[in-house]
Image (tube, grey):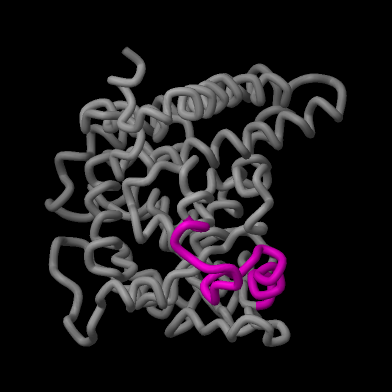
Amino acid sequence: MKQALFRHADGVWPNTAALAFTVLGWPLGIALLGQSHWALNALGVLLVALTLTWSAYFIHEFAHHAIFRTPQANERWGQFMSWINGSAYASFADLRRKHMRHHVERADVITFDLQGFLRAHPLVRRMVLALEWLHIPAVEFVMRGFVIALPFLGERKKAARGRVIGVAMIRLAAWALLAWWSLKALALYALAYLLFVHLLRFADCFQHTYDAYPILDDKPIPQDKLRDRAYEQANTYSDVVGLDAKWLNLVWLNFGFHNAHHERSVAPWYQLPRLHRELYPAGNAQVVTVGELLRAYHRHRVTRVLASDYGAVLPPGAPHRADGFIGAVGVSFLTAV
């Protein structure tokens, strides 16, 4: 019976275990945030950050219908996970539609022209760049703010106003209850959420050297180059901790094996390490490790906000090969509506 529920017969136990960990670990982590011992607080921060991260990547899995057999089950679970990580202001259908454009059109099709907005508002630009210099992911919160504001900026998303108001009221009430129980827990939850956003944006930052197009509606991207499968693989990178770092790669639910994901987008998270080995030889140029990318993540934290492209990666063996990889910002699938 369980095999009929899941799309892949080998996914019964890994999916059941990972979903249970996410759904149960999140409230357990919150409970640890309010305890008196600092070690329990630290464990709570890590547990909340990890389960928030997994809830986000499960939304990605559900968007590809990679977990459950029916679209309806994937959608229900996607909506549920969006309530955990705070992306429920947008509908799962909108998140899925925009993410599928990323795969079909082989570009970063984003919703909000962040660079245009920042250039038109110098004070906001200075504030955002200052916060980014401090390693506070201001861009990601601007993008989240746009998702909330979008239904009130015109008639196109007017029907979503009630949803946004309802979600906001429920989440504000939840934050108020958390503060009533423990102000320390509230502060530590905010810290865990910041860590979660950094984990997501680090992965998003270094997985492509695509072109980015801010398109709010369904207008196609310019046909200015050949974006075939060869282009897709050449402009996709697998930002893994290491090919053999089994447990650490699970921090991102194996999302770092990104070339394998783009080659076979319905392959579920637990199959990606094996699939990568089947598809690509050892020493593949598209593999760039987290260790190689940390300096670029720090070095270009301000530059990438207004950069015209994502930079480039040198061939394997070159010293500091990822130093010129500026990376993307504001391209999260959680804010693409």
Visible in this render: residue 174?
Answer: no
The residue under the point 29% across, 72% down is: 229
Where 288 sits versus 5, above or below?
Answer: below
95 lies above or below 167: below
Location of residue 232 in the rendering, given as x and y in whole percent from the top left corner: 34, 72
Residue 81 visible here? yes
Q: Quadrant of residue 43?
A: top right
Question: In the figure, is residue 77 to the left or right of 31?
Answer: left
The range drawn in magenta is 276-299
User: Can you say whether 156 is above or below 222 in the image?
Assistant: above
Q: Residue at x 39, y 72 (%)?
A: 233
The front one of 63 and 38 is 63
Q: Is residue 283 left or right of residue 83?
A: right
Q: Nearer the viewer, residue 76 or 317?
A: 317
Nearer to me, 21 or 243: 243
Q: Is residue 62 magenta?
A: no
